[in-house]
Image (spheres, grey):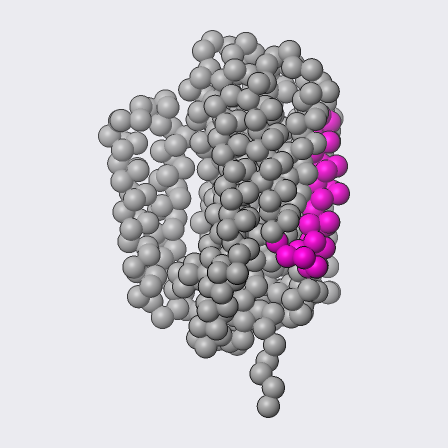
Amino acid sequence: MGLDNTVVNVALPSIRRDLHTSVSGLQWTIDAYTLVLASLLMLSGATADRVGRRRVFQAGLVLFTLGSLLCSVAPSLGWLVVFRMLQAVGGSMLNPVAMSIIANTFPEPRERARAIGIWGGVIGISMALGPVIGGALVDSGSWRTIFWINLPVGLAALGLTAVFVPESKAAHPRRPDPVGQLLVLAALASLTYAIIEGGARGWTSPLILGLFAVTAAAVIGLVPYERSRFEPLLEVRFFRSVPFSGATVIAVSAFAALGGFLFLNTIYLQEVRGLSPLHAGMYTLPMAAMTVVFAPLSGRIVGSRGAQLPLVVAGCALIASSLLLTRLSATSSVGWLLMTYVVFGAGFGLVNAPITNTAVSGMPRAQAGVAAAIASTSRQVGQSLGVAVVGAVATAGIHGELRTSFATASHPGWWITAGCGAVVLLLGLATTTGWAKDTAARVAAGAAGGGGRPVGVPAPVG
């Protein structure tokens, strides 16, 4: 699923030419997936805790593989978007269940941090390698081939899951929360649609203003409604923990930077510099290499020294690379461009493990699927908003052909990704203080009293 999240990016120019779509259409190709994924992750995590994690994981693999097959034969942009949404329904059943399995298999904090680091490294590596693999596939056939890669992987995963993954459920699973799920979906869908379509339809048009109003109403209604439920979809009390809340915002910021980075670079490398999909993917190899190196290293650092160092360095790297790219031009040197990719890849590689470890630590093991799903949702929300916001800002600055105006039009988008890096840096410092850790301990104690021992907290003796 991590690979699919980024492999599509390198095919965007080919999709634009073949299906005769606009830049906003390309945004929907990405955001149709991430939006549905973000909307359903918490529901899928709770469902897995209730009906069985292996069962939900296998159902997700079937839907994801079927959606991939249908995407490969989509006759138009509209159908491609619909089939991407089906893919996302299946994908929503994979990530939180995998994290729940890790949290329940590794109860000791240091072992769990290392296991999460390995998991985060695999996800990060697959996401970073996506443009390279996608470029090779598009060059060898067409953009449709990027979806074929999921078919053998999905079938193999089904077999391996049946053999090696034991079935597990939460001792006290949560009840369904359809109203909460509807409010989450309404908030995310209306916000994303308004951002993507606002430039074309007018930011003050009745439709766009109405969508922003729907977003505000859904968010305002969601919080008190979830607080009033005994078993809510969104555990509002978790957010009283400063590290948990900080990890959520860090995830949104870091993955917004990633979404914007991949979207802008894909169009720049192919439309402005005239590179083939394969060559454009090869340009991102330095970023992939740095992610390969720093993602597992981050997991080890978190396990031995805590989350502060990886988060601070990650924030600085994201800021530095984005600021360099605010000077991007059609004639920027290859060496300078690759240097920015190296720095960005190092920052992204460092940020994933501390997000996940902070999100799961201190949460009740019986609700690990829900806690992990909140962290995963934050990632997908961030990536969706990154593509929507950065893409909308860049589109607004395009005058004439993409080839001649896109590099300059992308500059405000790079300032936005620099701001995302600043958020990672500041929250990396704030969420690792003694005061922040005290708030996490209080939430962990309250959560344990309401629904099982917190993850990583040993059982009382005697």
How far from the left and from the top, in percent, is residue 3?
65, 41
Image: magenta residue range: 282-307
Q: Is residue 282 above or below residue 381?
A: above
Q: Residue at point 70% right, 65% down?
A: 111
Residue 216 percent across, percent down from the top left: 30, 44
Vertical side of 119 occupied by 175: above or below: below
Indicate whether residue 203 is drawn in magenta: no
At x 47%, y 57%, the residue is 242
Residue placed most toward the observer, 421 or 126: 421
Is most of the magenta stretch helix, strand or loop? helix
Residue occupying the point 73% across, 31% down: 285
Q: Position of residue 355 (x, y in %)?
A: 57, 52
- Rendered position, 372 above or below 298: below
Q: Residue furthest bottom?
A: 462
The quarter of the rendered structure image containing the C terminus is: bottom right
Outermost left residue: 206
Of all residues, the one furthest to the front in this rendering is 434
Q: Is residue 160 above or below residue 5?
A: below
Which of these two is toward me, 99 or 236? 236
The residue shown at (45%, 77%) is: 449
Query: Could one spot residue 163 in this view of the protein?
Result: yes
Frontmost residue, 351 versus 155: 351
Q: Position of residue 136 (x, y in %)?
A: 73, 29
Q: Quadrant of residue 57?
A: bottom right
The count of marks equals 0
Instruction: Give residue 194's quadrant in the image.
Output: top left
Residue 283 is one of the magenta-drawn residues: yes
Query: Which of 97/360 is in front?
Result: 360
Q: Is residue 81 visible?
A: no
